[in-house]
Amino acid sequence: LARETSATGAVLSLGGNIAFWGRKPDGAPWEAGIRDPNDPGGSSVVGTVRVNGGSLVTSGLYERTFELDGVTYWHILDPRTGEPVQTDVASVTVLSPSSTAADALSTTLFVAGSRRGAEIADALEDTAAYFILQDGRTVESTRWQELTDFSSQMGR
């Protein structure tokens, strides 16, 4: 719809999936915060990412969880076992030109874990990923800084 009007840019946010087109009216890039997975009920962010287009999608273990017998389960399942995936990743944010690709990749990279996930992202042109690990460390794919303007607010 935005392309059929005189709009020079638009943003569509569907929770963890955000699509950006063009630029803001003042010509500046779009900005989005990356939530801190260690503050699931809060609004803390680990940083702000600025992009000029594409889709930014985050998958994390802090959404859609339940506890049973003292064990927390989340909605991202390991396709090999059907159980909640066991990984070093707490969340992964993917930037891709395609919303569909970014959505599929965020889950795939989460399941793959940070080391293999970063390798997968690096093999894809115009794709970048930012991992926040369960121990609080972070991992960036090779193109994360190249394709985004990221300001970390993490003191780690």
Image (spheres, rainbow, N blue to C red):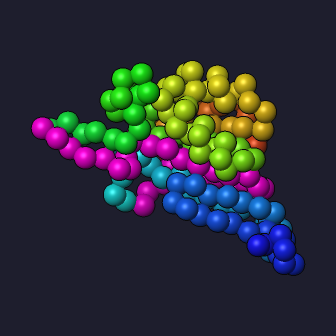
Q: Main secondary structure of the magenta part?
A: strand
Q: Can residue 104 be seen in this view?
A: yes
Q: Quadrant of residue 44?
A: bottom left
Is residue 119 shown in magenta?
no
Q: Is residue 60 above or below residue 26?
A: above
**Range shown magenta:** 43-69
Q: Residue at x 45, y 32 (%)?
A: 89
Q: Which residue is drawn at 51% across and 25% down?
A: 112
Is residue 61 shown in magenta?
yes
Screen quadrant of the N terminus = bottom right
- x and y, in percent, of residue 136 in the image: 42, 36
Looking at this view, name the residue that lies furthest to the bottom: 6
- x and y, in percent, of residue 66 in the image: 25, 46
Q: Quadrant of residue 144?
A: top right
- x and y, in percent, of residue 137 in the image: 47, 32
- x and y, in percent, of residue 126 in the image: 78, 38
Q: Which residue is drawn at 36% across and 23% down?
A: 81
